[in-house]
Amino acid sequence: MQDLSSLTNHQIRLAARPVGLPTRENWSFTTEPVAEPADGGVLVKTLFLSLDPAMRGWMNDVKSYIAPVGIGEVMRAGGIGVVVASKNPAFAVGDHVSAGLGVQEYCLIAQDQLKRSGIFKIDTRLGTPTQWLNVLGMPGMTGYFGLMDVGQPKAGETVVVSGAAGAVGQTVGQLARIKGARAVGIAGGKAKCDWVVNELGFDACIDYKGGSVRDGLKAHCPQGVDVYFDNVGGEILDHVLARINRKARIVICGAISQYNNTAPVQGPKNYLSLLVNRARMEGIVVFDYADRYPVAVAEMAGYLKDGRMKSKEDVVSGLDTFPETLLKLFNGENFGKLVLQVAS
Amino acid sequence: MQDLSSLTNHQIRLAARPVGLPTRENWSFTTEPVAEPADGGVLVKTLFLSLDPAMRGWMNDVKSYIAPVGIGEVMRAGGIGVVVASKNPAFAVGDHVSAGLGVQEYCLIAQDQLKRSGIFKIDTRLGTPTQWLNVLGMPGMTGYFGLMDVGQPKAGETVVVSGAAGAVGQTVGQLARIKGARAVGIAGGKAKCDWVVNELGFDACIDYKGGSVRDGLKAHCPQGVDVYFDNVGGEILDHVLARINRKARIVICGAISQYNNTAPVQGPKNYLSLLVNRARMEGIVVFDYADRYPVAVAEMAGYLKDGRMKSKEDVVSGLDTFPETLLKLFNGENFGKLVLQVAS
């Protein structure tokens, strides 16, 4: 076991709740000595952190599916780390784990917090650490259960997914194809759209920055839309609602276009298309499926292995870049799953 | 068989598409001689017509679950009539029937139009002609299948229904109670709300004209909302979305608050509550359940008979009053199912 007394834990804490896009002023940078775990606890060194649109919601002081991050608390983040000290027989020094580590270099997890942290050992034979934050991690699980349980695509149906080049989107489109459906993405910029089609094998991808989403849907969904997996909300949701088929399923996974709004959320003014088409709009929160993750991970790892599924991560290095790196999500700059590399 | 040559058929036709509320200028009043049915056809004398919020939608030239009424066509309306001439062995003179009769005194239905008209003989032992337009008719079937198939209330859950004093609303609330759920109505005015509670037996009714729907929901749904049956849309939908429970079901049946809008429809800005609560919003169109009507009618007739279900109709007499009578729906003036009596 390493000498811990020489180590310092750099942390990023929520200093103030943002209005609109979070800026550097919303964060504080603190250091703490690294402490030994007590009986039953573990100390994890952070390797990679997952940066996700949902983090923006956790910064607001509103009731949601999870409590907000408190002012002065280390910012919540899931990540992959390596166990550097353990007083728990279930974890050995050197084990790679996935857990809610927070935006910090070291995470001390006491025995009574293990369950809450969601810690589990990852099998690096199934995927790399960053793949465990992407296709094999929360975004992959979100895409998997949202698509399979709520979207329920049938072979030959048309599945549309927004945020197609993002972490959840890439899983959804590729999985839709694997299940025999037609996959149409919506993403921002020609480079992303080309990649979604050429590398991920989507049937088409509509560039919302380069043209009309309405026209794109008309051109690329000639049979209408059977499943829409929505990560963005706003006008794009309305455009898709205008083209859904009878008994369509709309998976509400997120609404990134609305997260930094200072005005009220824009509701889907075409929601009565649900009535006309006897369609369904349903929300999904990935945590509800926790006991089924292992089955989904095994399936997805199989697709990674046989090449039918690709997992692209956009890795940025340096804990201190966190405030700016997070904004890539909201500026649409990330290309694949956004990951912050904290140590190697 | 009656001498038909002496009879005149007074009709009301769509003259122009309305902007906002329909006025007398949107209608034309025509007369035609009454004709004998050809082989296989029937002639029906209209007794009662059903006036429904959906009629407003049929007047717009937009794609919906049913084609719009054409300019110059007799306005579409369902009704109860009596067969006055028949060249079809399935229908005898004197039979009471339910059919798409249109806003006119006589409806000639040719053999090849029988199916499209939805004509069927009603059993007046199960209910009166106006009950066959209400609890045993389209509104009752809409309430029944929307609640049972989409809403799926469980005993002890809280069901909220807007337009509670209307045709669909009264069915939904009473049926929710019969199924063991708590029924909370939303209606306009103290008189309606008192009636919904005292006569129909709802647990509570919130007066949207006399106070805050938000506060009313808080007071009367202390355990939150499990099923919301929405007939009105607009702000009320948003207020309910703010109080739904996990896995809530929202039945989108209509949006009467938006039907006469000249501005775009107001989308539910709280729709992300579906995500937070893993809830579902789903549209329903009653025609999809046509082959199950007989089973539902038998069940509902049983409740009428044993007194657990009441059926209230607001009957206005005179074909010529149609333009003004229709507006009662949009002014919130009708008290129970709105019916136009054309003959006795």
Image (tube, coloured by chain):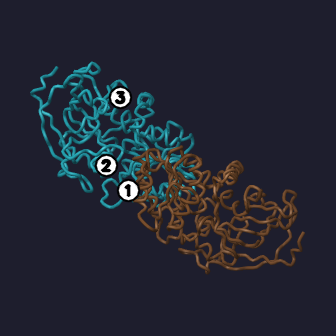
Chain colours: A cyan, B brown
Residue A344 appears in the figure:
no
Decide which of B96, A326 is in the foreground and name it.
B96
Q: Mark 3 vs mark 1: which is more N-terminal?
A: 3
Camera-near label (3 vs 1) is 3
Q: Residues within 10 Å of mark 1 (few under 14, many from 20)?
A: few
Task: Answer whether labels 3 and 2 touch (C-beta < 8 Å).
Answer: no
In the image, is residue B257 above or below residue A198? below
| Residue A273, image x, y percentages | 53, 57
Give the residue at mark 3: A127
Give the residue at mark 2: A57
Pinpoint the chain carrying mark 1: A
Asked whether, in this view, residue B190 is left or right of residue A301, the answer is right
Q: Residues within 10 Å of mark 3 (few under 14, many from 20)?
A: many
Camera-near label (2 vs 1) is 2
| Residue B255, image x, y percentages | 52, 62
- Secondary element at image label 2: helix
Indicate the amino acid at tag 2. Answer: Gly
Asked whether, in this view, residue A213 is left or right of residue B74, the answer is left
Indicate the amino acid at tag 1. Answer: Lys
Pinpoint the chain carrying mark 3: A
Q: In which quadrant will I find the N terminus of chain B? A: bottom right
Camera-near label (3 vs 2) is 2
Q: Do the residues marked 3 and 2 share a common chain?
A: yes
Task: Answer whether labels 3 and 1 touch (C-beta < 8 Å).
Answer: no
Q: Do the residues marked 2 and 1 share a common chain?
A: yes
CA gap, disc 2 and disc 1:
25 Å
Give the residue at mark 1: A209
